[in-house]
């Protein structure tokens, strides 16, 4: 296998059992890079007074990382700006929150040029390059402009918006055109893939045949490639000592009540406000059942410097306080709302102790929490997953209780249905979901993408030039 170079905004090698930051992406890339002796390149997360292109190399757990520091202006315009205040809200259908600023677009382009210039000298002729996510959409084209003829793939972790929404982005055409510099473009679901194809065909007149786009003599494979978790590893965490102890603590503090759990990075796309309203509806409508449950919502803060993230934090604090004030009793609080980060093995224990998970994003590329909850369940007595129809995971986990996350009624109904669900039904739904989580795990995802990336070009360079002659 040729060497793999992964490029993403942030570089975080999943190292050791007790790592806090190792989410699915970190796990997946760490495994892929370790196998191919690869390199992981990106931003260090640190600032510098003047961008120098100096690469800081490190070796962590068998993976080489190379990171660069960015100037304040790049961090403001590229990361906090275009990535998190323009593309993130727009791609999650929140045009009301998207900010369209020329400075942001310029900073995004400049940072991508800087990444391309910095990483280019490290690329050997046989390397395959895998660019990750919305921070780096134009990176492939910038590498091509610098003479890079390697196989280059791009994977989008978040949704791709419908064409009419994307059209609100002033740079939409240019941005999408830049993507045809890649050999492979991967999306989490068929739905996002279709939206991309419709835009490419209708707005850019690009010809698509059997999942291959033909643009300016180039052929680009378009695939759906849903990301998975390291299911075996997560299941083992849930069976490990830290998780067992955490689950025991949770059960004791639950005092025979059913624990409903939600775990989300604090982000407006995760639908936590709407979830609280759905849960409140359940409390109001089911007086006889309400005191049998409580909701534990874990929501570690993210992107704290962006205004809309401060707002969501305030809203949730206010809402959980109001609901608790109105419904709590001397011996019972309906919502435990926790703003901090837990170790993965503690999360696995929390999932194991929970009888219901509320995973109700308004829009989500995939949502790994849904898969982690499934992986952590006790086979003989599994919990029920309530899942948003608008999470990428809903294409695979069709045996969850699927809900419209905007509807408080549907969320309340689903909580009632979950509480009343017979054990046999719980087991049978869980088995089907677990089979999917195990089969289409993170290794499956990585192999599916890298196989497409390493596959021989559809036409040789000679064919292309003789056809265009
Ligand atoms: C993007 C896309 C896509 C959460 N709290 C803690 C903690 N977490 C972990 C979860 C999970 C990860 O963070 C979150 O993954 P998600 O998939 O839910 O969401 P995003 O961060 O938005 O990720 C998403 C993903 O990329 C992968 O392609 O699924 O759609 O938006 O692993 O468990 N981990 C620890 N402590 C916490 O308190 N250790």
Image (cartoon, grey):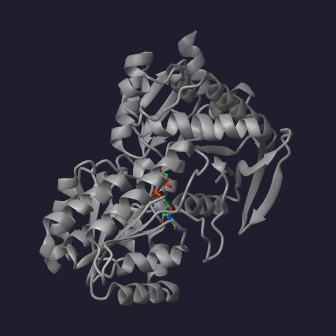
Tell me, yes or no, if residue 421 can be seen here. Answer: no
Q: Is residue 129 left or right of residue 125?
A: left
Residue 269 in percent (x, y) is at: 41, 47
Q: Is residue 186 above or below residue 226?
A: above
Q: Where, quadrant-wise, is the N terminus in this rendering?
A: bottom right
Residue 104 in percent (x, y) is at: 63, 29
Q: Is residue 60 left or right of residue 167?
A: right
What is the quadrant of residue 128 in the picture?
Answer: top right
Tell me, yes or no, if residue 53 can be seen here. Answer: yes
Q: Is residue 23 left or right of residue 34?
A: left
What is the quadrant of residue 210 in the picture?
Answer: top left
| Most foreground residue, 418 or 274 | 274
Q: Is residue 293 left or right of residue 36?
A: left
Question: What residue is drawn where x is 49% and y is 86%?
Answer: 240
| Most foreground residue, 273 or 397 | 273
Residue 38 in percent (x, y) is at: 70, 55
Residue 278 in percent (x, y) is at: 25, 58
Q: Is residue 135 above or below residue 340?
A: above
Of all residues, the one furthest to the top in this rendering is 469
Question: What residue is drawn where x is 43% and y is 22%?
Answer: 167
Question: What residue is drawn where x is 26% and y is 76%?
Answer: 293
What is the quadrant of residue 440 in the picture?
Answer: bottom left
Q: How many marks?
A: 0
Q: Is residue 101 above or below residue 3?
A: above
Q: Where, quadrant-wise, is the C terminus in this rendering?
A: top right
| Most foreground residue, 117 or 361 | 361
């Amino acid at each position: 296998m040729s060497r793999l170079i992964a490029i993403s905004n942030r570089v975080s090698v999943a190292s050791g059992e007790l790592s806090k930051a190792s989410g699915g992406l970190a796990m997946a890339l760490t495994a892929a890079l370790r196998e191919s002796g690869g390199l992981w390149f990106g931003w260090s997360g640190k600032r510098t007074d003047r961008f120098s292109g100096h690469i800081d190399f490190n070796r962590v757990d068998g993976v080489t990382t190379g990171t660069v520091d960015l100037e304040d202006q790049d961090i403001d315009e590229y990361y906090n700006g275009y990535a998190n205040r323009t593309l993130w809200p727009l791609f999650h259908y929140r045009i009301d929150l998207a900010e369209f600023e020329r400075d942001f677009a310029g900073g995004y382009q400049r940072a991508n040029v800087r990444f391309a210039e910095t990483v280019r000298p490290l690329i050997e002729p046989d390397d395959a390059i895998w660019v990750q996510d919305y921070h780096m959409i134009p990176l492939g084209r910038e590498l091509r402009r610098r003479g890079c003829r390697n196989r280059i793939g791009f994977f989008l972790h978040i949704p791709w918006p419908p064409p009419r929404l994307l059209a609100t982005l002033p740079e939409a055409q240019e941005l999408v055109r830049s993507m045809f510099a890649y050999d492979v473009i991967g999306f989490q679901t068929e739905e996002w893939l279709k939206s991309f194809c419709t835009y490419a065909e209708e707005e850019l007149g690009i010809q698509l045949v059997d999942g291959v786009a033909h643009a300016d003599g180039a052929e680009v494979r378009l695939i759906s490639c849903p990301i998975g978790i390291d299911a075996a590893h997560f299941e083992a965490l849930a069976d490990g000592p830290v998780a067992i102890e955490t689950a025991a603590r949770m059960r004791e503090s639950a005092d025979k009540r059913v624990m409903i759990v939600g775990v989300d990075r604090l982000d407006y796309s995760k639908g936590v406000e709407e979830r609280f309203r759905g849960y409140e509806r359940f409390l109001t409508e089911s007086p006889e059942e309400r005191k049998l449950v409580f909701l534990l919502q874990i929501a570690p803060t993210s992107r704290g410097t962006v205004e809309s993230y401060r707002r969501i934090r305030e809203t949730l604090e206010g809402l959980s306080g109001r609901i608790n004030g109105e419904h709590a009793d001397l011996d019972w609080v309906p919502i435990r709302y926790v703003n901090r980060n837990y170790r993965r093995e503690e999360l696995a224990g929390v999932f194991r102790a929970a009888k219901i998970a509320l995973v109700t994003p308004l829009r989500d590329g995939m949502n790994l929490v849904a898969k982690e909850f499934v992986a952590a369940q006790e086979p003989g007595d599994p919990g029920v997953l309530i899942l948003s129809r608008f999470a990428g995971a809903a294409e695979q986990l069709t045996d969850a209780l699927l809900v419209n996350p905007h509807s408080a009624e549907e969320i309340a109904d689903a909580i009632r249905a979950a509480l009343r669900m017979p054990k046999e039904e719980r087991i049978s739904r869980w088995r089907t979901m677990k089979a999917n989580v195990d089969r289409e795990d993170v290794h499956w995802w990585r192999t599916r993408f890298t196989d497409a990336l390493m596959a021989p070009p559809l036409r040789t360079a000679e064919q292309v030039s003789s056809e265009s002659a």
